[in-house]
Image (cartoon, rainbow, N blue to C red):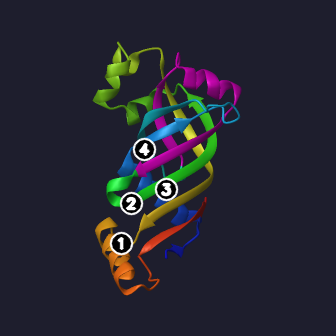
Amino acid sequence: MGNFENLSQQEAIAKIKELAEDIKICMFCTELSVRPIPTRPMSLQEVDDNGNLWFISSAKSNKNFEIKHDDEVQLMFAKNADAHFLSLFGKAVIYKDKAHIDEVWTPIAKTWFEEGKNDPDVTIIKVEPKEAYYWDTKEGKMITMLRWAAGAIVGNSIDDGSREGRLNV
């Protein structure tokens, strides 16, 4: 049995930063009312001090086109190896701010842009969290699994060290 631990303000921002920056890759969903929901893997560049998540994207991508028509997005982060999961709903805004592109640019991003960070198609997407939910463990996946095994052996419900809750930024 896990524990519910809703977090607010700075604690929520810290949890988003901890999980998202550790996991790094998310499934970035746009046009949330369309079935199937357009989804693609995206690499997180950073989570800022306000809890905003930043991504590098091409101005010509379907994702950018979709955000221009509907700015609501869902991000899903999962790291099964550590039992860390984060689902985040938010508002996306596209920027072409050269200073911020310089700040978040990584050499691997050049793979998608012929002219590197000076490519005219480079944009950055800021996702401002509106609602989020997390699942993780206090002591890591191995300890949690040992607790599950112990509970199964003794036949009792135990605190497995897992926790989940809403993140209110």
2 or 1: tag closer to the N-terminus? 2
Q: Is residue 139 visible?
A: no
3 or 4: tag closer to the N-terminus? 3
Label 2 sits on a secondary structure element that is: loop
Q: Position of residue 57 (x, y in %)?
A: 47, 26
Around disc 1, counting alpha carbons within 10 Å, would you say few (fewer than 14), some (14 to 19), or many (20 or more)?
Answer: many
Say if 15 sits above or below 155 in the image. above
Mark identifier at residue 16:
3
State which quadrant residue 103 falls in. top left
Question: Dot 4 corresponds to which residue?
Answer: 46
4 or 2: tag closer to the N-terminus? 4
Residue 73 vs residue 108, the one in the foreground: 73
Mark 2 to mark 3: distance in Å?
15 Å
Q: Amino acid at mark 2?
A: Ala
Q: Is residue 70 visible?
A: yes
Answer whether residue 71 is magenta in the image: yes
Contact between marks 2 and 1 (CB within 8 A): the answer is yes
The magenta segment: 52-78
Q: Position of residue 128 (x, y in %)?
A: 60, 45
Mark 1 to mark 3: distance in Å?
21 Å
Question: Dot 2 corresponds to which residue?
Answer: 83
4 or 1: tag closer to the N-terminus? 4
Contact between marks 4 and 1 (CB within 8 A): the answer is no
